[in-house]
Amino acid sequence: MSNAIVRGSLAGAALLVLGGLVPAQERLPQPETYCVSTPNSFTRGAEMGWLGHVEISRNDFALVVSGAVPQSIGIFLWGSEAQRLPFGSGYLCIASPVHRLDPPQIVSDSGHAIFKIDFRDDFHGGMFAPGTSCNFQFLYRDGTRFNLSNGLRVPFAR
């Protein structure tokens, strides 16, 4: 896998059916990146992305980070509000209170980590509700210091 940011779903896409465009589904707000990442010892900075859909009922949403330091340990964080506060070697893009998405992740040799949110799980599923937005970020070790990705705001739907 390249160092490209993984993004997206097919929400709001259209299908060509018998010569006409038919909406694939109701248009839903999509995740958006915000804040900034800073260079680390591997790349110009770790970037957040996602796989799957924002609809909780589909239960296929995953957070993805690319450009983190290979074989480092990191953890995905979340909170309801955004900010930009110098922190470690980067910026904390989530305002207090900041929550952890356990367990910690080991970054792959290509600088990626993925965390699938299981909305059916009582612990993770109970934290996110349709109609709310959450902010996510990845915190990781970089040698003797730590750094953070940019932020990802995710509007969850039913």
Image: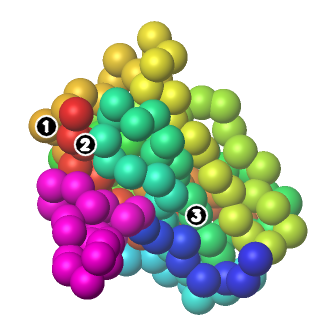
Task: Give the labeled residue for mark 1.
Answer: 131
**Vertical side of 122 occupied by 95: above or below:** below
Q: Where is residue 48 in the image (x, y as percent from the top left)?
A: 48, 66
Q: What amino acid does circle 2 point to?
A: Phe
Distance from disc 1 to disc 2, alpha carbons, whole Å, reads 6 Å
In percent of width and height, residue 100 lies at 49, 34
Query: Residues under labels 3 and 2: Cα distance?
Result: 19 Å
Mark 3 neighbour class, 10 Å CA radius: few under 14, some 14 to 19, many 20 or more: many
x then y, percent, for residue 44 = 59, 88
Q: Earlier in the sequence, mark 3 or mark 1?
A: 3
**In magenta stretch: residue 27:** yes
Q: Which of 123 and 30 is in front in this view?
A: 30
Distance, label 3 to label 1, CA atoms, is 24 Å
Label drawn at residue 65? 3
Q: Is residue 34 left or right of residue 10?
A: left
Residue under label 2? 156
In this picture the colour scheme is rainbow
